Amino acid sequence: MADFSALILAGGKSSRMGQDKANLLLHNSNLLQHMQQLATRAGASQVLISRNQTGYIQDVHSEQGPLAGILAALPHCEHKRLLVLPIDMPLLSVFSLQLLMQQSAATAYFNHCPLPCVLTNNSQLQALIEQQLLNQKRSIKQLLSTLNAVAVSIDDKELLNTNTPADWQVFLQQLTSATEYDN
Ligand SMILES: Nc1nc2c(ncn2[C@@H]2O[C@H](COP(=O)(O)OP(=O)(O)OP(=O)(O)O)[C@@H](O)[C@H]2O)c(=O)[nH]1
């Protein structure tokens, strides 16, 4: 597997959660740290974080959604392959992310979900995102379709998207049962 960069998108408003999803607590860490560790364990040699706070990669086009986060991060990427992770999919496994990164296709994603995805950082990608934002088209799905992205199948359970406090409770319950099982 070639070296790759990872980008964690944590620049959204978390309005449905009612608090910044990056700061949600699990075990001895928070969700941002959990996702950083996941990216590193999957093999990323660089982990970038998109978050609209000092010390992180901040959007140049504000309130334009995840595509703006990706665009702002591209100049910081050290590698051609870029794994883009949302902050709010804590059940993703290292195994599945490695499967995604092993795809020979330039662009790939899981099942029906546009995030996470793997992109190839080149001038075409930057131009396409800029064009979409210019046309007020903020959909990652549209970008993936233009790039002829390949869908990789995994268990839908890994794609639990924790957008609300109720989703977060579902995740914590699954985490507790997994820990009990391990013991
Ligand atoms: N950099 C950046 N990331 C974003 C932006 N909007 C959403 N994201 C990220 O994209 C992913 C999916 O975001 P959503 O869950 O749709 O939106 P959210 O803002 O996190 O949550 P809601 O406010 O409840 O919709 C998350 O990882 C967000 O952090 C944005 O404007 N900029």
Image (tube, rainbow, N blue to C red):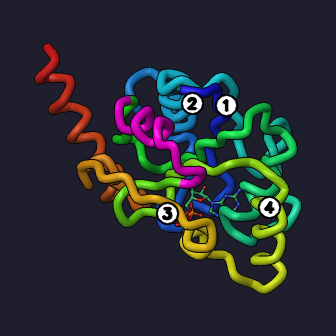
Q: Residues within 10 Å of mark 3 (few under 14, many from 20)?
A: many
Residue located farthest toward the front when viewing the structure as drawn: 104
Question: Tag 4 or tag 2, which sits nearer the N-term?
Answer: 2
**SS of the residue under disc 1:** strand
What amino acid is at disc 3? Pro
Q: Position of residue 127 (x, y in %)?
A: 84, 66
Coordinates of residue 96 in the picture (x, y in percent): 36, 38
Is the distance from the Cβ of mark 3 to the nearest ligand 1 atom less than 8 Å? no
Judged by depth in the image, the label closer to the viewer, 4 or 1, is 4
23 is higher (above) or lower (below) than 45 = below
Observer-nearest of 30 and 11: 11
- In the image, which is nearer the foreground, mark 3 or mark 1? 3
State yes or no: discs 2 and 1 in contact (Cβ < 8 Å). Answer: yes
Residue 46 can be seen in this image: yes
Pair 3/4: label in front: 4
What is the three-letter code of the residue carrying label 1?
Val
N-term mark: 4 or 1 = 1
Q: Which mark is residue 131?
A: none
Q: Secondary structure at mark 2?
A: helix
Query: What residue is at 81 percent from the left and 44 percent from the top?
Result: 57
Marks 4/1: CA–CA distance: 22 Å
Lateral position of residue 90 relative to residue 7, left or right: left
Q: Which residue is mark 1?
A: 47
Residue occupying image coordinates x 19% and y 29%: 178
Q: Which mark is residue 36?
A: 2
Residue under label 3: 114
